[in-house]
Image (cartoon, grey):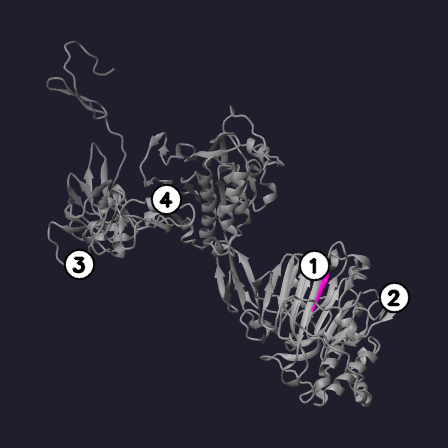
Amino acid sequence: MGLRLARLVAVCLALALAGGSELQREARPRSHGHSVCSTWGDFHYKTFDGDVFRFPGLCDYNFASDCRDSYKEFAVHLKRSQGQGGGHPQVESILLTVKDDTIYLTHQLVVVNGAMVSTPHYSSGLLIEKNEAYTKVYSRAGLSLMWNREDALMLELDSRFQNHTCGLCGDFNGLQSYLEFLSEGITFSAIEFGNMQKINKPEVVCEDPEEVPAPESCSKHRAECERLLTAAAFQDCQARLPLEPYVQACMQDRCRCPQGGACVCSTLAEFSRQCSHAGGRPGNWRSASFCPKSCPGNMVYLESGSPCVDTCSHLEVSSLCEEHHMDGCFCPEGTVYDDLTGSGCVPVSQCHCKLHGHLYVPGQEITNDCEQCVCNAGRWVCKDLPCPGTCTLEGGSHITTFDGKKFTFHGDCYYVLTKGAHNDSFTLLGELAPCGSTDKQTCLKTVALLTDRKKNVVAFKSDGSVLLNELAVTLPHVAASFSIFQPSSYHIVVNTALGLRLQVQLVPVMQLFVTLDQAAQGQVQGLCGDFNGLESDDFRTAGGLVEATGSSFANSWKAQASCHDKLDWLDDPCSLNIESANYAEHWCSLLKKAETPFGRCHLAVDPTEYYKRCKYDTCNCQNNEDCLCAALSSYARACATKGVMLWGWRERVCNKDVGSCPKSQIFLYNLTTCQQTCRSLSEGETHCLKGFTPVDGCGCPDHTFLDEKGRCVPLAKCSCYHRGLYLEAGDVVLRQEERCVCRNGRLHCTQVKLIGQSCAAPKILVDCNNLTALATREPRPTSCQTLVAGYYHTDCVSGCVCPEGLLDDGRGGCVVEEECPCVHNKDLYSPGDKIKLDCNNTCTCQRGRWQCTQFLCHGTCSIYGSGHYITFDGKHYDFDGHCSYVAVQ
């Protein structure tokens, strides 16, 4: 039943815009009963000017309207009906018109401009709320209406409507009776005045009430009514309200209702409401036997409570409230209303938290890429996590920096998108160029990655070709410092060892998405900004100054001195062509409509910026549809980054590619580098890159795998990838002492020399067909020979190997490293064995290596046979000469 924060905003705006003397007040006055008109109980009415009268009409009446001739801002019509079972008459319906909005209220329905709405309902300058006690309407025009959905209706107007109203509420001129019941010397009765406010409808026949003599026995109830209205509960009201009008109304109630004291409940309730509106605090005058009220759940009824009730979703509303107290159902002290689960009044510690339409219990934790949050007493308590930055270049001109700054630049050159600020570890360039009928339509043509300190240059062209150092490469391509994969025909992804990840979109236009690990914060520069968490300094030029405009900033990052500087273009392309503007509005508006697939993402990603960019690109593009689809796909990708997959968004728009997939493939929206391919079965996790947003495109149905020819095949027909070659299913290859068969996308190998199921101790068996931790661990030396020669990661080989910590000694046994033998002339020597070399040098076997003395020996040069020579350094050569030669000097 609480008053939401939006209501406070609406009321504040209404007060700020209101005319008259209230503009000079810092806050609304505590008492403003003079601006309130009401009706209650047995046809009682109170005008703005304070007249209280009884009018028993059951037709449609003008309750209050703006009656100026030039412009009418509002009108309130009501219709009463007889109460059931002889009870008080009820307000059956209310029709409220405020400027261009029409609100129709009944006991169950709220209809705005012909459409049923749920409450709370917010629209431009209008707020409609409903709680257990009242339906409330607030308008920024300076009007508020409160109806208890039974017999009582209260209307409050801004003072700028003074002397401008008409209807049952009077003219609001500050003078009682004048012009309502006394005009130009003519006196009107309440019945005559009320009948003049009737709304005549041609199709409705409704009889006017007639004058009826007042009952003579009313005066005998004066003492009772005075006692009720001056009770202790109303002590704070006596000096704030005139008592006599309510005593008269109470007496009339008792006269016309022989059912006892219950008939006066409505008048006492109205007196209490008017007292609260005048700034008073009436006490609880009800009891279990006199005018009782009940509340749902564990709520309690109070005659005077703050209408701004704290709720689990708005915990501090009461501290901001400027509204008068009112009667109704409230939460007990120390609790708040749980408007999230509807479980009544709960301690704050039991409040749930809400995120993207989902509820989370207290203590529940959620984690995303950038923060970790815990639900605590209805609020999220979050701490930052290491978060990568993302820079985008979309539509050929729209750039978003790592720190979130957005700008549009129509370039014609190679530009530095990002590079290391203090070293040349990497540089990322982008080529922008005109691609339409004017230079104001630009496209991304090339993305160039310079890595390994500029030793390798990888260029990605808009036609999908990839060049490494100007030579075409086929994908996937894996190198030491980077790897390139193509999860779909529309996208290329690049992973580097530097924490830089690229996602290149090729269709319908080339777009680039750059992700950089948090470790690079503050260590990069270029069009993507400096990634220091501050958006304000992202326009820092190559010279170190922060520019004010995007063009001045971008021109400083040209990678080619021959290019001309470009200027900012501030025109709206949709203003130049009405047909393009209509086309763009029709299709781009899909982003904002909740009933489209894009609506599923509105809570995660605000579509406003994407909608503006979509219209700009679609109007500015020679091929409208391509640019439209690129803009829509950018929003779909942003949603996928947040974990919201927009399945089916291409069914109504941009669907020409959906049906053009190769014969065995289907169109999917969640393709990653971890897709099932035959090659991934052979190479495992090397193809499954983390940190990339899923993309759409053609892929394989479930339980099939993409082979090297682009076909989706069942597992049994998958080829195997082995040392750069593809083997068809069933092909056999021999390696070392193994016979390997391609089966289910992997090589299954058996030794040609039969090995038993057990090995001589302490050796253990490794079966590559049943990979174990031993076969897949990091490279390690397995024999004394590889310890000396160096050990490298090679293919798995089945057979008997020494366990961890022992090495094969070459004799069929396993030894520790200290006991490794040494090899000389194919003979094995145990540790400590010595051999003699030339002259006096000897070598000793230690840990598998020969340790030799380095004594100097006399040099010997030999000449023998027919031209055979051995030099002092042991070099052998032949020379068949026929002259005299110098042998040594």
CA gap between label 2 and label 3 equals: 125 Å
Q: Amino acid at mark 3?
A: Ala
Q: Residues within 10 Å of mark 3 (few under 14, many from 20)?
A: few
Residue 847: x, y in percent? 26, 47
Residue range corresponding to the magenta coloring: 139-145
Looking at marks 4 and 1 on the same chain, the residue that comes earlier in the sequence is marked by 1
* Residue indicated by mark 1: 140
CA gap between label 3 and label 1 equals: 90 Å
Q: Is residue 555 left or right of residue 681?
A: right
- Residue 172 to residue 844: above or below: below
* Residue indicated by mark 4: 657
Toward which corner of the image does residue 129 lie, by quadrant? bottom right
Where disc 2 sits, the SS reads loop
Looking at marks 4 and 3 on the same chain, the residue that comes earlier in the sequence is marked by 4
Residue 298: x, y in percent? 59, 80
Toward which corner of the image does residue 103 lie, by quadrant? bottom right
Q: Amino acid at mark 4?
A: Asp
Is residue 129 visible in this depiction of the protein? yes
Looking at marks 2 and 3 on the same chain, the residue that comes earlier in the sequence is marked by 2
